Amino acid sequence: MYLAIIEQVLFFGGLLVFLVSLAMYAGRTRDYRSLVEFWKPTMAMSKCEFNVNRAGLTMMIVAVAIRIINFLIH
């Protein structure tokens, strides 16, 4: 029960943090094309933006791991 709630909070919280990092980048550089063409390595993030980005991705990965663990337990 609690793992399912934690998983949802981590996933959507991580998604929000990830989107905030992209908004930080867009606000600093005004380079919206790099956000749309995310498969091209054209984004040069600052250290703070990069750390926020990775924190969001890590939160989402942990949420997926919790979902897998919760599936295997039950």
Image (tube, helix red, strand yellow):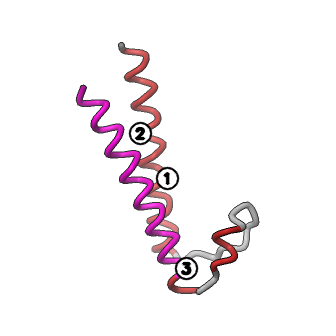
3 sits left or right of 62 in the view: left
Q: Residue at x 49, y 52 (%)?
A: 57
Q: In the picture shown, does residue 11 fall above or below 29?
A: above
Does residue 3 belong to the magenta stretch?
yes
Residue type at mark 3? Answer: Ala
| Horizontal and vertical percent position of residue 67 | 42, 29
Q: What residue did someone put label 1 on?
A: 57
Where residue 50 appears, as percent x and y from the top left, is 52, 68
Q: Mark 1 falls on what kind of element?
A: helix
* Main SS, magenta residues: helix
Q: Is residue 62 magenta?
A: no
| Amino acid at dot 1 | Leu
Which residue occupies 41% across, 61% down?
Answer: 17
Q: Which residues are magenta?
A: 1-26
* Residue 15: percent from left, percent from top: 44, 55
Return the disc, 2 or 3, that comes first in the chain's sequence: 3
The Cα–Cα distance between marks 1 and 3, rounded to whole angstroms, is: 18 Å
In-image side of 45 versus 39 (left or right): left
The mark nearer the N terminus, 1 or 2, is 1
Numbered disc 3: secondary structure:
helix
Find disc 3 in the rendering and name its residue: 26
